[in-house]
Protein backbone atom coordinates (compact mmCIF):
# COMPACT_ATOMS: atom_id res chain seq x y z
CA UNK A 1 0.00 0.00 0.00
CA UNK A 2 1.30 3.43 -0.92
CA UNK A 3 0.58 6.18 1.59
CA UNK A 4 1.14 9.90 1.42
CA UNK A 5 0.92 12.01 4.55
CA UNK A 6 1.47 15.75 4.43
CA UNK A 7 0.65 18.75 6.57
CA UNK A 8 -0.08 21.72 4.35
CA UNK A 9 -1.13 25.30 4.86
CA UNK A 10 -4.70 26.13 3.87
CA UNK A 11 -5.54 29.25 1.91
CA UNK A 12 -9.26 29.67 1.34
CA UNK A 13 -11.08 26.46 0.51
CA UNK A 14 -8.71 24.93 -2.09
CA UNK A 15 -5.68 22.74 -1.52
CA UNK A 16 -3.43 21.16 -4.17
CA UNK A 17 -1.54 17.95 -3.46
CA UNK A 18 1.49 16.91 -5.53
CA UNK A 19 1.52 13.11 -5.68
CA UNK A 20 4.67 10.96 -5.75
CA UNK A 21 5.39 9.23 -9.08
CA UNK A 22 4.20 5.83 -7.72
CA UNK A 23 0.62 7.09 -7.86
CA UNK A 24 0.66 7.42 -11.68
CA UNK A 25 -0.01 3.67 -11.99
CA UNK A 26 -3.38 3.98 -10.25
CA UNK A 27 -6.66 5.36 -11.58
CA UNK A 28 -8.16 6.34 -8.21
CA UNK A 29 -7.02 7.46 -4.78
CA UNK A 30 -8.84 7.79 -1.48
CA UNK A 31 -8.42 11.22 0.06
CA UNK A 32 -8.98 11.88 3.76
CA UNK A 33 -8.50 15.43 5.01
CA UNK A 34 -8.16 16.03 8.76
CA UNK A 35 -7.65 19.45 10.33
CA UNK A 36 -4.64 20.01 12.56
CA UNK A 37 -6.36 21.12 15.76
CA UNK A 38 -3.39 23.20 16.96
CA UNK A 39 -3.74 25.40 13.87
CA UNK A 40 -7.37 26.44 14.49
CA UNK A 41 -7.84 30.14 13.74
CA UNK A 42 -9.77 32.19 16.25
CA UNK A 43 -12.80 33.60 14.45
CA UNK A 44 -13.37 37.32 14.62
CA UNK A 45 -16.59 38.59 16.18
CA UNK A 46 -18.45 38.84 12.87
CA UNK A 47 -17.52 35.27 11.86
CA UNK A 48 -18.57 34.04 15.30
CA UNK A 49 -21.98 35.69 14.99
CA UNK A 50 -22.46 34.32 11.47
CA UNK A 51 -21.63 30.81 12.65
CA UNK A 52 -23.93 30.80 15.67
CA UNK A 53 -26.74 33.13 14.57
CA UNK A 54 -30.03 31.38 15.21
CA UNK A 55 -28.43 28.64 17.30
CA UNK A 56 -30.06 29.78 20.53
CA UNK A 57 -33.65 28.53 20.69
CA UNK A 58 -36.53 30.91 21.23
CA UNK A 59 -37.61 30.93 24.84
CA UNK A 60 -41.24 31.42 25.88
CA UNK A 61 -42.15 34.84 27.12
CA UNK A 62 -41.81 35.04 30.89
CA UNK A 63 -44.91 37.24 31.22
CA UNK A 64 -47.02 34.32 30.02
CA UNK A 65 -45.39 31.74 32.30
CA UNK A 66 -45.20 33.81 35.50
CA UNK A 67 -48.95 33.85 36.26
CA UNK A 68 -49.11 30.06 35.75
CA UNK A 69 -46.16 29.55 38.08
CA UNK A 70 -47.65 31.83 40.73
CA UNK A 71 -50.94 29.90 40.64
CA UNK A 72 -49.02 26.66 41.27
CA UNK A 73 -47.49 28.14 44.42
CA UNK A 74 -50.84 29.17 45.88
Image (cartoon, grey):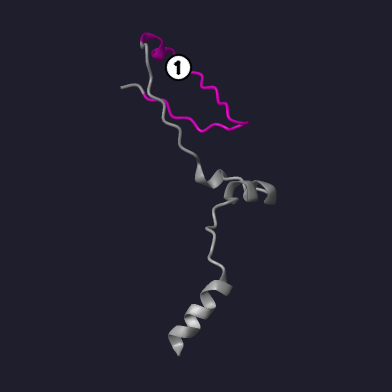
Question: Residue sitting at 54 percent across and 22 percent down?
Answer: 16
Q: Residues within 10 Å of mark 1 (few under 14, many from 20)?
A: few
Reply yes or no: does residue 29 show up in magenta.
no
Q: Is residue 52 above or below residue 32?
A: below
Q: Nearer the viewer, residue 47 or 60?
A: 60
Quadrant in which the N terminus is drawn: top left
**Residue occupying the far top of the picture:** 25
Q: Nearer the viewer, residue 21 or 66?
A: 66
Q: Is residue 32 above or below residue 25?
A: below
Q: In which quarter of the image is residue 73?
A: bottom left
Quadrant in which the C terminus is drawn: bottom left
Is label 1 in a helix, a strand or a loop?
A: loop
Residue 5: x percent and y percent? 44, 29
Which residues make up the magenta segment? 3-25
Residue at image mark 1: 20
Q: In this view, does 57 lie above or below 21?
A: below
Residue 28: x percent and y percent? 37, 15
Q: Is residue 12 above or below residue 60?
A: above
- Give the number of callouts: 1
Question: Residue sitting at 55 percent across and 26 percent down?
Answer: 15
Residue 29: x percent and y percent? 38, 19
**Residue occupying the far bottom of the picture:** 74
Question: Residue sitting at 47 percent across and 84 percent down?
Answer: 71
Q: Is the magenta stretch mostly helix, strand or loop?
A: loop
Amino acid sequence: MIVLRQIQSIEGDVMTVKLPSEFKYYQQAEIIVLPVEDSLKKPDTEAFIQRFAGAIPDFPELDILLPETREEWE
